[in-house]
Amino acid sequence: MAHRPLCFDAAMEVSSELEDFGVVHAWIRKDSMWVLHAWAENEDAVYDLTETNSPIRREDYYAACGVTEERLRRYDRVAFFTQVAEKGMFGPFDTGLFFATESEKDPLEVMKTFTPL
C-alpha cells in the first residue's frame, strides 16, 4: 500500500459529520513499508474511507495495520479542527514524527538519527 494523500481529507470528512469521532495520524505497516496514514475513530470503531465506507472495529483495524500508540497522534474533534484552522491543512500536523509519507525503516528508529537544529 502506498501513501494515500486523500486519507487526510477523508478523515476530516468523517470527523465533520460524526461528532464523537476524532482523527488519527499514524504510521501503519503495509507491504513491508511504513506508510503515513489518517483515519477517523472513536473508542470502538474506525472509519477509513480509503478502505471502505463501513466502520471497522478499532482493535481489528489496529491489528491489521500494525498501529501502535507511539507511532500515532490522536486528535479529538475540537483539537483537530483547531489545528486545521491554525495550519491551513488537514495534516499531518506533527512533522517531526511524520517526516515523510513512506519509510522502509521504522520511523522511530529513523527519528533517533536526526540531528537537532
Image: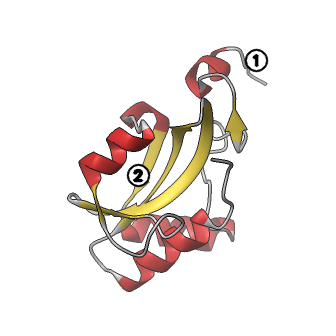
Residue drawn where x is 70% and y is 45% of the image: 101
Q: Is residue 18 above or below residue 41?
A: below
Total label count? 2
Where does the image place residue 92, in percent across and percent down from the top left?
Answer: 62, 54
Between residue 54 and residue 102, name the one nearer to us: 54
Left/right placement of residue 56 relative to residue 87 reads left
Left/right placement of residue 21 relative to residue 44 reads right
Real-space Cα separation, disc 2 to disc 1, in angstroms: 26 Å
Residue located farthest toward the right when viewing the structure as drawn: 117
Where does the image place residue 115, in percent across and percent down from the top left?
Answer: 76, 17
Q: Amino acid at mark 2?
A: Arg
Where does the image place residue 66, in percent across and percent down from the top left?
Answer: 42, 36
Identify the image quadrant of residue 112: top right
Disc 2 + disc 1, Cβ < 8 Å: no
Residue located farthest toward the bottom when viewing the structure as drawn: 17
Q: Is residue 18 above or below residue 39?
A: below
Q: Is residue 27 above or below residue 108?
A: below
Where does the image place residue 36, in percent across and percent down from the top left?
Answer: 61, 46
Mark 2 or 1: the one toward you: 2
Residue drawn where x is 43% and y is 77% of the image: 14
Between residue 22 and residue 83, name the one nearer to us: 22
Tag 1 residue: 115
Q: Amino acid at mark 1?
A: Thr
Tag 2 residue: 74
| Disc assigned to residue 38 | none
